[in-house]
Amino acid sequence: MVSIKDIAERAGVSYSTVSKALNDSPLVKEETKRRILEIARSMGYQRNLLARHLVSGRTRLIGFGLVNLGNPIFANLTIVLHRALAALDYRMVIAISPDEIDLLNQMRADGLVIWADLVSRHPHLMEELARWQAKTLVIGTDEPVPLPHVRFDRRAGIAEAVRYLRSFGHRRIGFIGSSQEIKVRAFLEAVEQAGLQPSPDWLYPAEPTFEGGYRAIRYARPDVPMPTAFIGLNNLITKGALRALLELGYRVPQDVSLIGYDNLPDMQFAEVPITTVGPSLEEVADFAAHRVVDMINGKPGPDAHVIQPILIPRASVERAPHRDAD
């Protein structure tokens, strides 16, 4: 069986350099990494996680548990978290079900980063995670949980979006989406705090998908005046709503302004660059990667951390039409 030592001798480098290259560490130059990987392939090298665990007590493997790769928020977070963990010389494996999380535990993963929705959909998972040897960090929670966690202040994000629209004179502000109650409640509270009287007509129920946002606007009640601004519950809903508004002949932002929750890079490339609010995914990934690795290494740190939202202005918001402005 080919070993790392054999590869190091053939490549003329140290054992540690080969180990780092096989783990895709950024500490090894790309040219050296490619040469080592080619030598390893030519020699028929196969990794053995169990052997690594027996020798070092570590697999340098971290699982990322999430619920839906179809939503761009998860695809983007997966990319930046993978990059952050690789910089710390750890490999990441994705899991989208409790069974796959259990498999990672059986593989002796050193740590787990779990998206909060996976736990809320499978309540028994929280107790199992607390018993397993893998160090676990839950991210994206709205409220405190029994495990170390990272909370997103979604309430503050929605409030910031309402304040921003009010600063442009908007009085009739709609909210598109209904799948996250905390955001709906935050919207109604923020509207009231802004001195406006919330109306049920300002709530546009929608599935958290592109089609959901599109249909909420395209087939809205014709007897209800169109708000001069909308906040979309997530990135997909917001882009669907934008498409519907443009098809209906509304100019964005001259007739209707639009803000989307989720700070994703591709929102700037929509038909109209969309103003967004939400946590920075780079900040989330960087904190999660360092915190879970610190937990693995027994370093002290906070059991609870809150990431505040940021608002990124783009071309989708303008002053309310004169007849509707303050």
Image (spheres, helix red, strand yellow):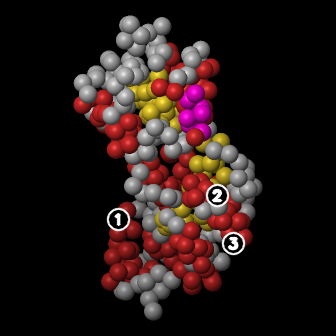
Tell me where residue 40 sits by quadrant.
bottom left
Position above or below: 298 against 211: below
Label 1 belongs to which residue?
Answer: 31
Depth order, front residue of 288/122 = 122
Circle 1 residues within 10 Å: few <14, some 14–19, many ≥20: few
Which circle marks residue 133 in the picture? Answer: 3
Query: x%, y% of residue 166?
Result: 50, 17
Q: Main secondary structure of the magenta part?
A: helix
Circle 3 residues within 10 Å: few <14, some 14–19, many ≥20: some
Which circle marks residue 157 in the picture? Answer: none
User: Distance from label 2 to label 1 (Cα)?
Assistant: 35 Å
Query: x%, y% of residue 315?
Result: 35, 24
Depth order, front residue of 245/78 = 245
Give the residues drawn in magenta, as a range: 182-188
> Quick check: is 63 in the magenta stretch?
no
Mark closer to the observer (3, 1): 3
Tell me where residue 245 sits by quadrant.
top left
Position above or below: 325 against 207: above
Q: Is residue 297 visible?
A: no
Which circle marks residue 137 in the picture? Answer: 2
Say whether disc 2 or disc 1 marks the residue closer to the N-terminus. 1
Say whether disc 3 or disc 1 marks the residue closer to the N-terminus. 1
Mark closer to the observer (2, 1): 2
Instruction: Name the kind of residue labelled 2 in the image.
Output: Leu
